[in-house]
Image: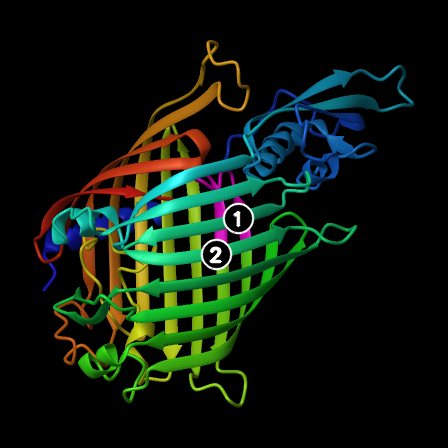
Amino acid sequence: MIPKKWLLCILVLTAFLVTSFAATADTSVDSTQKAIVRAVYLKGNYRTRDRIILREMTLHMGDSVRLADLSGRIAWDQRNINNTTLFITVDVTSEFIPAVDSTQLAQLDITVTMKERWYFIAYPVFDLADRNFNEWWYDRGHDFRRVIYGGHLSYRNVTGNNDRLQVVIERGFLQRTILSYSKPYIDRAQKIGLRADVGYITNKEIPFRTQFDKWVYVKSEDVLRERVYAALILTHRRGLYHYHTLDTRYVRNTIADTIALLNPDYFLDGKTRLQFLAINYMYRYDRRDNIVYPLQGTLFSAGIGVSGVLPRDNFHFLDLNTSATRYWPLGKRFYLAGSVRLRSTWPVRQPYFTLRGLGSGNDMVRGYELNVVDGQRTFIWRNSVRYQLFNVRKQLNWLHVRQFNTVPVAAYITAFGDAGYVSSTVAEQYQSQLANKLLAGTGMSLDIVSFYNLVMRFSGTINAQGKAGFFFNLAQDL
C-alpha cells in the first residue's frame, strides 16, 4: 500500500501538468508589419562551416518575416544553433533598416556571434564500473578496485561539418575498445547522415542474476563475458525537429561455462553464445530550448527493435518503446516538466541479460537509485518543478584560450515526484520485492549546469517503501 502522502504529492504535480499557461502577447509592434532579411552574418565560426549553422536557422537571406514574430524566431534559431553543442556561447541579434518609401519593405540584418568549443580532447579515464555513483558508494563499499581506467579521444568537428571521431580504450574492471565515426550530413540537402561503430568488450566480473532487486556478481581470473559488435547507423533529419534513425548491427555475445551453470537462463537453456543481427528504427521529435538541461519545449520518441533477423541467429527479440516529455516555463524563474515512458518486450520468456526494467540507464524512478527491477514491460511517469537560482556567464580574462575562458554556470532547486511499474513474470524466480507493484518516489535536488554540458545533481529522496537516501548523479534527464 502506497502512503497517502506519496499519492498526494503525485496528484499535486499532475494538477500542474494539466494546467495551461497563456502566453502574454507583445503589443509593442505592428503585428502586420513585415521586413526582408537582407543578410545573415556569422562571426566566430573559425572551424565550423557556414552551412552547418545556417541549417539550424529559420531566418535566411531573402526571407520575409513579420516583426511580431521576429523575437520568437531569433530565440529559437539561437537555441537550435546552441543545441548542436559545437559552441560555448551563441548570440543572435538583428538590426532594423527602415524602408526608404512606402513601396518597399523594411530590411533586417541578422548577426550570429559564436564562441567555438575545444574540439580535440584526449583525456585519461577514471570511471566507475557500477550502474551509478550511488550503487558504488552505498552497495559496493566505494571499492576502488571497481573502477575503469584508460583513455578517451574525442575529436569533434573534424572537417568542420559537425562530424565526430571517437576512440575509447579502457582497462581495469572491464576491458573495452571502441572506435566510432559519425557525420550528420553526407548529402547536399543536409538531411542524411551516417555513423559507424565497432566495439570489443570483456568482463571478469559481471552480475549473473538479480536477487531482492539487487545485482549479484561473480568474479573470476578468467574472462566471464565477451561482446563484439559492429554497427552502421543511418539518420534522416526532416526540417529542424524531426529525426529518423535506422540502426543495423551484428552482435556476438559469449559467456563462460561458469555463468551458464550459475544461471542457465542468462542466455536461456544453458547456452554460452548468442549471435544475431539487430535492426532498430527510432523516430524522434525534438524541439527543446537546450538539449543538455531543457526548460521549454517538447521531446517525443517511438521505436521498434527486432533482433534475430538472419536464419542462423539464435536470439530473437522484439522491443517496442515510446516516451513523451514536455517542458513549460511558468514565469518568475519557475519551470515545470513532465514525462511518460512505456516499454514492452517479447517473447515472455527471455534471457536474463535482456530483462531490464527499472534501474538501467535513465529508466529510473527517483528514490530507487539502488534497485534494479527486472521485467518485460515498464511504465515510468516523472514530474519536476524547478526554480532557477542563477544563470550567469563567467569570463576568465586571465585565461587566454578562447575555448575555455567563458564558463556558463546555472543552478536550480528541483522538487520532483515519480511513479513507475514493472510487469514481470520472473519476479518470484529472482525474489523481487518491487516488481508488479506501483512504485513512487519524491524529493528535492540541487542541479548545477556548467561547463561543456556538465549537469551535476544532488538529491534527497524518499520512496513508497519509506526508504530515504541522498544521491549524486551526472544527469541529462528530468
**Percent x, y of residue 141:** 11, 49
**Secondary structure state at the residue bearing disc 2:** strand
User: What residue is at 67 percent from the left and 31 percent from the top?
Assistant: 47
Q: Determine whether 203 is above or below 119 in the image.
A: below
Compared across the picture, whether 267 is left or right of 441 comes to right
Q: Which mark is residue 391?
A: none
**Percent x, y of residue 439:** 19, 61
Q: Determine whether 222 is above or below 104 in the image.
A: below
Q: Which residue is tagged 1?
A: 166
User: What residue is at 90 percent from the left and 16 percent from the top?
Assistant: 101
Q: Report if the CB atoms under discs 2 and 1 are less than 8 Å apart.
A: yes
Q: How crowded is mark 2: few (under 14 residues within 10 Å), some or many (20 or more)?
A: some
Q: Quadrant of residue 79?
A: top right
Q: Nearer the viewer, residue 312 or 10?
A: 312
Hey, what amino acid is under mark 1? Gln
Based on the picture, tell me whether residue 406 belongs to the magenta stretch. Answer: no
Hey, what amino acid is under mark 2? Ile
Q: Distance between the residues labelled 2 and 1?
A: 8 Å
Q: Which residue is tagged 2?
A: 178
Provide the residue span drawn in magenta.
285-300
User: What residue is at 37 percent from the left and 84 percent from the top?
Assistant: 347
